[in-house]
Amino acid sequence: QVQLVESGGGLVQPGGSLRLSCAASGVILGINAMGWYRQVPGKQRELLAIITSGGRTTYADSVMGRFTISRDNAKKTVYLQMSSLKPEDTAVYYCNADIIVTAAYTTRNYWGQGTQVTGSS
């Protein structure tokens, strides 16, 4: 059973920083792309950043220059370093990963349970 477990959310003042972590566990033969999304009530889930297995990154315009995605392949963990946080960054943040689960390279997509980030003034 593969699981993604996020941590690091919380309350932060505008202009502050926060680092989210997401660790994968279970029967994992490899991990392809990993990413971070966020969602606010009543809106669609928004893609924030993606990192490939080789370390190539892509960012949404809304977080470019403020958020940094990284990964530690040995730890099966993806991180999101967030800085210059704004009240509008308040959302539930989710990690996502394409995980190789069989020797035949069957890949399945998994989501974490979400972690709340709240910007306060």
Image (spheres, grey):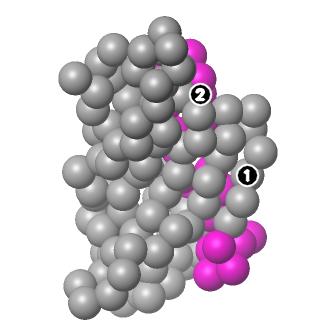
Question: Looking at the image, which residue sits at the far front?
Answer: 104
- Which residue carries the number 1 mark? 57
As measured in the structure, the alpha-carbon distance from the residue carrying label 2 to the one carrying label 1 is 14 Å
Sequence-first tag of 2 and 1: 1
Q: Position of residue 99 (x, y in %)?
A: 46, 31
**Mark 2 — residue?**
72
**In this view, the mark in front (2 or 1):** 1
What residue span does the magenta drawing correspond to? 60-81
Residue 30: x, y in percent?
A: 53, 20
**Residue 66 or residue 5, whichever sits in front:** 5
Q: Please name the residue shown 67% across and 33% down the image.
A: 53
Q: Residue at x 65, y 73 (%)?
A: 60
Q: Residue at x 77, y 45 (%)?
A: 56
Residue 7: mark in rendering = none
Q: At label 2, which amino acid type do we have? A: Asp
Seen from the viewer's position, the closer of residues 40 and 96 is 96
Q: Amino acid at mark 1?
A: Thr
